[in-house]
């Protein structure tokens, strides 16, 4: 059945909570595949995958699927719908249990958040890949009002973040 999900998501399901379910990279890749199938995720508006072991390529695939699925309104309790609509001037994600996947999702949406002036991602485990994704998004954003970026230690010393923020006049804290 094309509308069947091995991840357990049904076509009429609006919320999928995998928080702390010990998901591994293969699970994330499967979930990413299902998020790309309209029949499987037709009603899904909220997805939570915090506190799992999603890293590397699986994190990239899942974050791309989340950014690409326009029906998702919240991801790990982060307001994806408002981010896409560019209705936020400040986004405080301090201590939200963000991992590399969420950092990549945020990075994927930075280019459409032209009104965002302050982003706080402190108190989260971004990992090196998450920090690099944020740096790349800031560096490549053509229209960016961001003036302050708060990151967890030691990422304020990350050379890519420092360079991207300096190039765009963003205070890195």
Image (cartoon, helix red, strand yellow):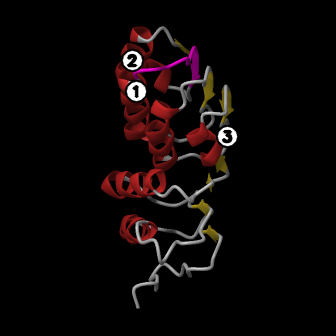
Find numbered disc 3 in the image and state the secondary structure of the residue it sits on: loop
**Where does the image place residue 20, in percent across and percent down from the top left?**
60, 65
Find numbered disc 2 in the image and state the secondary structure of the residue it sits on: helix
- The answer to whether residue 60 is left or right of residue 121 is left
Nearest to the eye among marks 1 and 3: give it: 1
Q: Quadrant of residue 13?
A: bottom right
Nearest to the eye among marks 3 and 2: give it: 2
Residue found 67% across the figure and 35% down from its top: 94
**Residue that sits furthest to the bottom in the current view:** 1
Q: In the rendering, which numbered label is found on residue 164?
A: 2
Q: Quadrant of residue 45?
A: bottom right
Q: Is residue 147 above or below residue 12?
A: above
Q: Which residue is mark 3?
A: 95
* Mark earlier in primary sequence (3, 2): 3
Find numbered disc 1 in the image and state the secondary structure of the residue it sits on: helix
Q: Contact (CB < 8 A) between labels 1 and 2?
A: yes
**Quarter of the figure with the C terminus:** top right
The magenta segment is 142-150
Query: What is the magenta segment's predominant secondary structure?
Result: loop
Q: Nearer the viewer, residue 23 or 113?
A: 113
Q: Is residue 39 visible?
A: yes
Q: Is residue 34 magenta?
A: no
* Mark earlier in primary sequence (1, 3): 3
Q: Nearer the viewer, residue 53 or 106?
A: 106
Q: Contact (CB < 8 A) between labels 1 and 3?
A: no
Measured Cα–Cα span from mark 3 to mark 2 = 23 Å
Measured Cα–Cα span from mark 1 to mark 3 = 20 Å
**Quarter of the figure with the N terminus:** bottom left
Q: In the rendering, which numbered label is found on residue 135?
A: 1
């Amino acid at each position: 059945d094309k509308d069947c999900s091995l991840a357990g998501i049904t076509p009429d399901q609006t919320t999928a909570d995998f928080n702390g379910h010990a998901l591994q990279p293969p699970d994330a890749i499967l979930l990413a595949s299902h998020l790309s199938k309209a029949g499987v995720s037709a009603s899904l508006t909220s997805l939570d995958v915090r506190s799992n072991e999603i890293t590397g390529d699986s994190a990239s695939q899942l974050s791309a699927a989340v950014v690409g699925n326009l029906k998702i309104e919240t991801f790990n309790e982060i307001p994806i719908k408002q981010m896409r609509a560019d209705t936020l001037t400040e986004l405080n994600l301090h201590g939200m249990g963000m991992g590399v996947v969420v950092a990549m999702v945020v990075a994927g949406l930075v280019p459409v958040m032209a009104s965002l002036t302050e982003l706080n991602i402190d108190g989260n485990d971004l990992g090196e890949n998450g920090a690099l994704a944020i740096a790349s998004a800031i560096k490549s954003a053509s229209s960016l009002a961001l003036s302050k970026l708060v990151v967890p230690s030691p990422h304020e010393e990350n050379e890519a973040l420092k360079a991207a923020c300096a190039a765009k006049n963003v205070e890195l804290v």
